[in-house]
Image: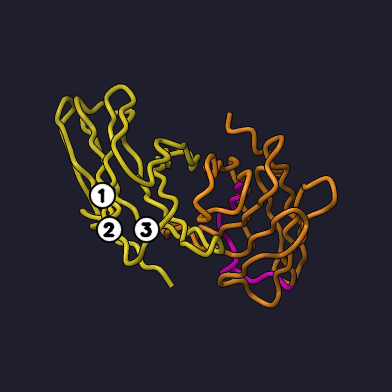
Chain colours: A yellow, B orange
Amino acid sequence: GIQVEQSPPDLILQEGANSTLRCNFSDSVNNLQWFHQNPWGQLINLFYIPSGTKQNGRLSATTVATERYSLLYISSSQTTDSGVYFCAVGDNYGQNFVFGPGTRLSVLP
Amino acid sequence: DSGVTQTPKHLITATGQRVTLRCSPRSGDLSVYWYQQSLDQGLQFLIQYYNGEERAKGNILERFSAQQFPDLHSELNLSSLELGDSALYFCASSVYPLGQGLLNTEAFFGQGTRLTVV
């Protein structure tokens, strides 16, 4: 099945810093989403981005499907950005939606 | 609020027992997915339904079963519970099965059911 890797596994930032999270996947995909899991466990949709670039406030994402990676940019980080960021991809057979292992982000005041 | 409703939010039960977790998808969504997240672990895909039919299975134990009803809500049944089954169980829904390249096949997740087996 499709494999998803994320880097870095852990990231510690000072408030106000910028960061880039990466997601690599092993096969062609027709769906890619980024999620933020907050400290209470809730999974929040950030981006639906199978290709191209999107921006939402301080967050933006880029997926280069031909090279099988996606990037999530967080600018001017805030303590509320802390949590785990997951990338998930859907394979071309519509039968599976696989999550990467996540990047744990800690933003310090 | 994602529009996906899971009940109960918390569940504490003893080993050997059986529980049922319920999921109501977003209005108009035909696909339902179940995931298990053990402590400090990633999300493991369990099973997928589309319009009442099982479509894909992941690492779902034989002690676990699920179904999607005609009104599209889904239930995940966990039996002969073991301590290791303690986890956060998520349900997600989408209009179409993910990965088919159709527009608006974004998945939305419920708040999860936190199961503790003691």
Q: Within 10 Å of the Cα at label 1, are there few (<14), some (14-19), or many (20+) other Cα atoms?
A: some
Q: Looking at the image, which residue is at 74% across and 49% down?
A: B22
- Per the model, the C-alpha gap separating discs 3 and 1 is 17 Å
Q: Is residue B93 above or below residue B45?
A: above
* x and y, in percent, of residue A93 in the image: 52, 65
Residue to which mark 3 is pinned: A100
Q: Nearer the viewer, mark 3 or mark 1?
A: 1
Q: Is residue A80 above or below residue B89?
A: above
B49 in relation to A85, above or below: below
Q: Are marks 1 and 2 on the same chain?
A: yes
Q: Please report contact status of discs 1 and 2: CB closer than 8 Å, yes or no.
A: yes
Mark 2 sits on what residue?
Answer: A68
Q: Which residues are magenta?
A: B80-93
Where is the N terminus of chain A found, in terms of image quarters?
bottom left
Residue marked by disc 1: A64
Q: Quadrant of the C terminus of chain A?
A: top left
How crowded pointer 2 is (Cα within 10 Å; few <14, some 14-19, many 20+) is rated as: some
The numbered mark 2 sits on a residue in which chain? A
Q: Quick one: B13 or A54, which is closer to the camera?
A: A54
Name the side, left or right, on which B107 lies relative to A82.
Answer: right
Q: List x then y, in percent, for residue A90.
A: 46, 57
Residue at 64% x, 33% y is: B3
x%, y% of residue B95? 63, 43
Give whichever of discs 3 and 1 has the lower sequence position.
Answer: 1
